[in-house]
Image: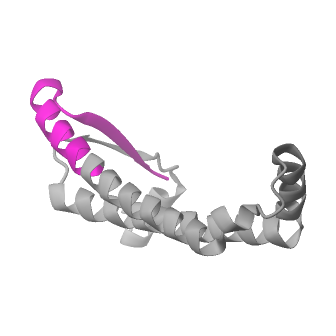
Amino acid sequence: MSSVAEKLQRKESRSTTAKQVRLKLVYIDFWSVVKFSFLVWLCLGVVLVVASTLVWIVLNSTGIFGNIDELLRDMLGDDQFTITDSFGLSQVLLFSFVVAVLNTVIGTILGAIAALLYNLSVRFTGGILVGFQNN
């Protein structure tokens, strides 16, 4: 007769195979998608505002705006024209903030529409088959 310890020892010597689970994604929660898409687009909006500010600061500190001013003065003949009057830091910040807000609103709406369309299309397609494996 074998003891329990011997049975456990034999059981451990066998190689374990990976278990697979196949699941169908048949429903996406509408409010979860709306909240997630809002947060993603909000983060992208912050990145847009910071990036546009940094680009303006780098262009201003390297003197590119001064070179463009000289070039436009030579071409137009206007001695009082400066590009920073038209594209100052406050104008760039305001424009990038408005674009970030519009992107956030539109992106959130598109995320909600995508969730609704997926939930409606599941009735016809049966959902997406997703496989998971345990190693």
Which secondary structure type mostly characterizes the magenta part of the structure? helix
- The verdict on residue 119 being magenta is yes
Q: Is residue 64 above or below residue 21?
A: below
- The verdict on residue 29 being magenta is no
Taking the image as shown, residue 26 lies to the left or right of residue 70, namely left
Taking the image as shown, residue 34 lies to the left or right of residue 91, namely left
Which residue is rendered at x = 12% and y = 24% of the image? 124
Front one among 104 and 56: 56
Front one among 95 and 114: 95
Residue 100: image quadrant is: bottom left
Which residue is rendered at x = 25% and y = 57% of the image? 33
Location of residue 125 in the rendering, given as x and y in whole percent from the top left corner: 18, 25
Residues shaded magenta: 111-135
Q: Is residue 103 visible?
A: yes
Given the current orientation, which residue lies at the most extreme top position?
124
Q: Is residue 81 above or below residue 26?
A: below
